[in-house]
Every structure is written in C-alpha cells, then in structure tokens.
Image: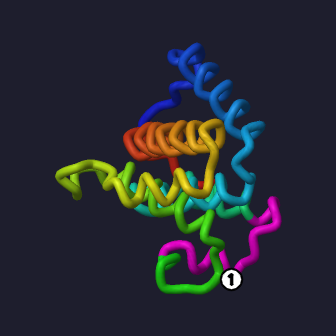
Amino acid sequence: MRMSIRKPAANGLKAMYALETYLNASPVPRATLDLVRLRVSQINGCGFCVDMHAREATEAGVSGQRLHAVAAWRDTPFFSEEERAALALAEAATRLSDNPVGVPDDVWEAAADHYDEEALSALVMAIAAINAWNRINVTLRNAPA
C-alpha cells in the first residue's frame, strides 16, 4: 500500500461512506448493487473491491454460481432481466471511452424499463461510487487482506 488516506482525507471518506449508506437504503436490491459493484471492480482491476464485494454478495445471499459467472453474465442464464440491465448500464458507464456515445441509448432504455427514476438514479450513483472507490484503491495499491 502506498499510503493511507484515512486521516488526511477523512472528510472526503466520510462523504463517500454517507453515499454508501444512501445506496444501501435505496430501492435497488442489495444483490443487484453487489453484483454491479463486483462487475465494475473486475473491469477496473481492483482486487480489494473484487474481494470485498464478492464476500458482501455472498453474505447477501448471492450464490457462488452467480458470483463466478458475473464476469460472463451475458452468456449465462443466472441473472434476471433487471440484473442484466443494471450490469449492462454499469459496464457502459464504466467503459465510457470504449463507445463514442458514452452510454448507448438502448442500454439506458433497458435500465429505464426495469427501474423507476428513484432506483435508476441510485443505480447511476452506485456505478459512479464504485468507480471512485476502485480508482482510490488501485491508485493506493490497496490489496485484500
């Protein structure tokens, strides 16, 4: 680990933890949040977050089969249409530079078909939050314990 930001960035971390509290109380199912957090962390190569969110997903009741398949969610039958829409949105919003239009309309519309405005807003915030956490942990080289 390069450094700890717990003390010098205490106020920033406090704000991010408050965001997590909001997200965990949002109408998005906890399992969906955990799957999104896991998938985004896989894309970003954040070992710390992959480990943490795999454990949290297990605690939330996500099966090992689904956890192992999340990296290939498009090619497996283990995810609901709602989860697929959330995972597609998470991937598109994480890989913005891979698409000239950012998040394609069809991806957005699929998510909007499955989530109301409150849940969709929380999902967008969750994707932004896990991307931020990944960038912090990868930059600092935080590793799973």
**Residue 29, horizontal then vertical, whole percent:** 74, 53
Question: Quadrant of residue 24 in the image?
Answer: top right
Which residue, given by chain and number where applicable, does mark 1 sit on? 65
Magenta stretch: dominant secondary structure: helix
Name the residue at 68% across, 37% down.
Answer: 23
Q: Say which element carries label 1.
A: helix
Mark 1: amino acid: Gln
- Please, is residue 22 above or below residue 44 in the view? above
Magenta region: 58-71
- Using residue 30 as the reference point, say whether residue 121 is left or right of it: left
**Residue 133, horizontal then vertical, whole percent:** 50, 40
Q: Nearer the viewer, residue 13 or 120?
A: 120
| Quarter of the rendering occupied by the C terminus | bottom right
Residue 112 visible in the picture: yes
- Using residue 61 as the reference point, say whether residue 13 is left or right of it: left
Label 1 crowding class (10 Å Cα cut-off): few <14, some 14-19, many 20+? few
**Residue 138, horizontal then vertical, whole percent:** 41, 46
Question: Quadrant of residue 58 in the image?
Answer: bottom right
Total numbered labels: 1
Residue most extreme to the left: 100
Name the residue at 55% across, 85% down.
Answer: 76
**Residue 71, horizontal then vertical, whole percent:** 49, 74
| Colouring method of the image | rainbow
Residue 45 visible in the picture: no
Q: Is residue 6 magenta?
A: no
Q: Is residue 62 magenta?
A: yes
Name the residue at 75% across, 76% down.
Answer: 63
